[in-house]
Structures are given as structure tokens and as C-alpha cells.
Image (tube, rainbow, N blue to C red):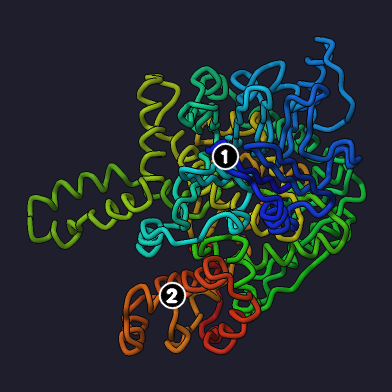
Amino acid sequence: MCGIFGVVSLSSEATLPASKLKASLHLLHHRGPDASGTYSSGRFAFAHARLALVDPDPRSNQPFWDESKRYALVYNGEIYNFKEIREELEQQSIHFSTSSDTEVLLKGLIHIGSDKLLARLEGMFAFSYFDKEKGTLLLARDRFGMKPLYIYKDNDRFIFSSEVKAFRPWINFDFNPFPISSYLLGFGGPTKGATFYKGVTSVTPGSYIVIAPGRELRCETFFSMPDFLDPDHAEKLQGFSPRKIVDHTEELMYRSVESHMFADAPVGAYCSGGVDSSLLVAMARKVHSNLAIFHANVVGPWSEVNAAKALSQHLKLDLNVVDVKESDFITMMPDVIRHYEHPYTYHPNCAPFMMVSRLARDNGIKGLLSGEGADELFLGYPWMGRETLVNAYYQLGTKLQRLVHKIPELGHILWPQNSNNHNVLRDMFNQREIADDRTQARNRIARLNSTQINQDHLTSIDYLNFHLRTLLHRNDSQGMEASIESRFPFLDHHVVHSAVNMPKRFKLRFSPKTLERAHPFIRDKWVIRKVADRWIPRKLSQRVKMGFWTTTAERMVVAAEYFKNSFIQDQFELSMKQIAATLEEADQELKMRLLHLDVWSRVCLLEESVDHVRSDLIKYVNIRSQEVAPTNRMAL
């Protein structure tokens, strides 16, 4: 896992200052503290900060050149099927001088070609592939968006980077009003295309860009989430018995964990106490007997530390714990946003993630297994089970609605016709990121025209798009701040292919003993829980989802004085009296969005010291005490 950066001059007379290249590399140091390298010649300059997990020998440092010195690779990621590709190339008498996936990726691009190779790569990646002789550059990003890749283009330069902050030596930062407007209207934040920074965009996952002399920049897609839909596989899984689907899923998951544990440096695991991470830890424990596991204990009524301790005791592993206090959600805010690079209101639990990543780093670990993807694939969010329960009464509700609509006044009360303009406008401001993903998935089902693929398959596809991308951005930004690589066994391509095409009855299943408040009598993630029953005690495999749960954001109080002479006050041209009135009238979510937006402007746009911003937050923001008895909010 690494940080990559590059500049292409679009003018043959322009020069690329070495001082700026080194400054950008310095801003990516946290992504790769083990080694660094640069290359600059003519119109091209590249930089690489290396976190060495595979073949840590300097021979695998980057930029990585082939023997002829014609081709170069600047690469961030892990290719889990690189050994298979290497064997194929060796059969063609291709020689290798390292044991790294970096060399395999470069020589695969040279000898197999990007058109054929990209769709075959299993893992996570963002890279640039340079052909010095032709003066061409290819940039590519993995299909899920696990690894970030940002670009900037004007008349003079094309720049790419793992993080936006590395552009600072080359361009003047300004805000992009449209994503910000969408965010204030409730959007979680952009994960592809436009960003909060004017002129800076992120490469769409599953796509690549080609830059060639005298030609227009070319963008192509090599994979999108609906490509996982497979009528033949869906038909096969439809015929599986419950026992067979559990056996099948267990086999896929264990193979995935084995491949994700491969490294020449220590790899541990996040241990939240939930079923997803607990299953991964149990399987990884079989692969590596001395597995290091880490837990963020969000101190309070929703703490999961006891579940994490129970798992560690069951597996005879030492649990490393960092306690997360309510005050940490205030004091860590500028650190989190500096690396998140836009407001993180959509994921208020970022601070625990950064803190547990720092704990792993301090214990000498470089990579951690993470359970991201399980809830999207196997329908583990509480509202998914609730929707299934509601659908059971659909026919009754439809008949009632027909009856009520015969009485116009009553129909208006029960089904008010609210305007959809708010959502349409929000979609416009974010370039229809979510809306277009949903349309693409539905169009794919229509084109397949198969009885084996239906609307039930869309839920996982929808969540594998925007929502999963936000989680992967959280993992990358908060983990790499501490030089920690997250690995995602649930997002192994074979696991995803099976889960996407799996009948819904193996994900959400009637269970008379399930009494969760969100969806009584519906067991979520059924197949994963049945697999977990074979590896961990049932009191852990059947636990309700929590996920670093906290209500601190709901209880934060922001004094109007914080916004004096602020970005918010300046851009909206409000007096302090108007600021106070806005805070009085806004709901809690909007208050948090305004606060996060202002902190982002200070630490990311204006480059204020995080310590200076932190001192203001401590002065003007506090958290109300918990006034009511705790309930499992994730299960409501």
C-alpha cells in the first residue's frame, strides 16, 4: 500500500520543478514511510511513497522500471492473484527479478495488455503505467474503489495523486460549490467524479484513463457493479439447499482470507466484536496462529469491548484495545477531516477508526483485515430486515390503499404528496452519482431479461456502489493516516460473485427465535451467521450489529461564536445574529454538516494548523450528557 503522484506537462516547453515534486511526495509520506522514489524527465514526473508489505527489498521500490527502461509503474495496492498471473507469464519465458506483485503487474501490462489484464486483476489498485518511448500514460482504479485516485487537468498540466493534498504545491485550492450544496442538502459526499475542490475529480472505480501525445484524454470502463449479475450462476445457487449454500460460502470465505493474509510484513485484523470481523479473525487465526487483533472501545452504553474480549479468549489471542472517549469525537475532528478531505458527517465513527489504526501501527502492524462489504453483500443493515418484514404485508397494504383512495381527504392524510424537487436538485448538485448508478443497474437487469435475476438482486448492487465506496474511503483515509493498509476478504471477486447472485432467502430468513427490535422474526446475514456458527460461539455469531455506534454527533452543541469570521459566515454572508438564528432553526444533522464543512475549509482549503482548529473546537463545542437510558439505536 502506497501513495502515488505524477505530473504530465501538456506543453513541451514547460518545466516540472523538482522542488514541487518532492513537496508533493512529502505530503504523502504517511501513506508510505518505508521508502520513496521520484522520476522526472521532460514532460513527465512521478513520485512514490512505499508501504512495503510484499517483497520489502529495495529492488521492488518504485517507480518500477522493466529491464529495457521503457516502461514504468507507479502503483498503490495489492493484487491477490498475482502468483497465477506470474505463472502464466513465466510459461511465456518472461523473467522476473523480484517476488513482488508490482513486477507482475508491470509485466502483465506489457505482455498481456491493459485491455485483457485489468478485468482479471483481483485486489485493490490505483496505478499509472508509463510508456517512455510512446510518451503515453495509463491510469487505472480497481472496480470497488478501494484505492483512491484523484486527477486535475488544465491547459498546461495533467496531475494525479492518491490524495488531494498532494496537489497543493502545483495548484491553488478553491471550493466547488455544487458538491458542497448537495452535501448540505443531505448527500454523503462524492466518491467519484467531482470533489469538494474546484477542478479536482476522482477517477471512477473500474475505469482507466489514457493520455497520449496529440490526442484527447480517453476514459474507458472495464468493470461496473452490475457486471457481477450472472443468470447462470443465479440459477445454480437457486438449487442449493441451506446446508450446501453454507458449505459453499464457507469455502469461498476461507480461501479469500488465506489470500488476503499473504504478506512479507505483519498483517493483523480489526476486531469490532461484530459477526463479520469475528468470522474473519477466527479464519485468519487458523492461517496465522499469532494473529494480532485490535479493537476501538467506544466507551459508553454501546461498547462492544466485551464481545471482542470474548472472541479473543475463545481464540486464545491477545486483544489490543484503544479506549475512545466522547471528547475524542471533538478533539480528533480536524485530524479526521484533514485526511478524509471532505466532511465525514455520513460516517461519524471515523475517529475510532483512526485511533485503532494508530494503535496497530504502534504495535508494528502494517495491514489489517476488515469486514467491509459483508453488510452490503449479505443484507446486514437493520433496515433491510425491516423492509422484508414490511413487504410481508404488502398485499394487505395495497388493498387498504385502494380503499382509502376512494376517500380523497383520508388519502391525503395517509399518503401526502410531497414534492420530489429536493431530491432531484440534490442529485443535480452531485452529478447524479447515486441516481445514475441505480439506473445503470436496473437497465442491466432489463437487458439480461432473465427469470433468474430480479429486483431482489438489486439491493446488494446498489449498496456495493455509493455506500460501499464511502466505507472504503473511510478505511483508506483513516487507516493510511497511520500507515495501515486495510484488506477486505468479503470483497474477493468470487465471494462477491456468489453473494450478488445468491437468492435472498439465504440472506434474510424467517427465524421465530429472532427478536431484534428492527426486524423481529427475520435473521439478517443468515448464511454468514451460519458459517460463523462453525467458527465462533453462537453468542457472538448471532449478535446484533453495532458498528462503533455512538450518539455523540446527535448530542454535540456548537456555540454560534465558533462561526465568527468563518468560511460559513463569509460564503453565506450572514451576520452573527443570522448565524445564531440559523443554528436555532436547523436540525442537529444540518448543524453537524455546517460544523464539518467549516472545519474542512480551515484544515484542507486554508491549511490551518489542526492544533489551532482543535483549540477552537474545544472552546466552542461540547457534548450533552446522555439523558435517557440507552437503547440499541442500530436495531431500531
- Above or below, 628 relative to 24: below
Q: Residue furthest top?
A: 92
**For the residue marked with disc 2, what is the amino acid?**
Phe
SS at mark 2 in the image: helix
Q: Nearer the viewer, residue 536 or 142?
A: 142
Marks 1/2 in contact by CB < 8 Å: the verdict is no
- Above or below, 229 relative to 194: above
Q: Which residue is mark 2?
A: 567
What residue sits 49% from the left and 20% below the top? 231
Q: Which residue is mark 1?
A: 13
What residue sits 55% from the left and 84% below the top? 623
What residue sits 17% from the left and 56% below the top? 417
- N-term mark: 1 or 2: 1
**For the residue marked with disc 1, what is the amino acid?**
Glu
Residue 428's label in the rendered image is: none
The spot of residue 157 in percent (x, y) is 53, 43
What residue sits 52% from the left and 17% below the top? 232
Q: Is residue 387 left or right of residue 574?
A: right
Q: How many marks?
A: 2
The spot of residue 325 in percent (x, y) is 68, 78
The spot of residue 198 in percent (x, y) is 44, 55
The spot of residue 131 in percent (x, y) is 67, 26
Q: Residues within 10 Å of mark 2 (few under 14, many from 20)?
A: some
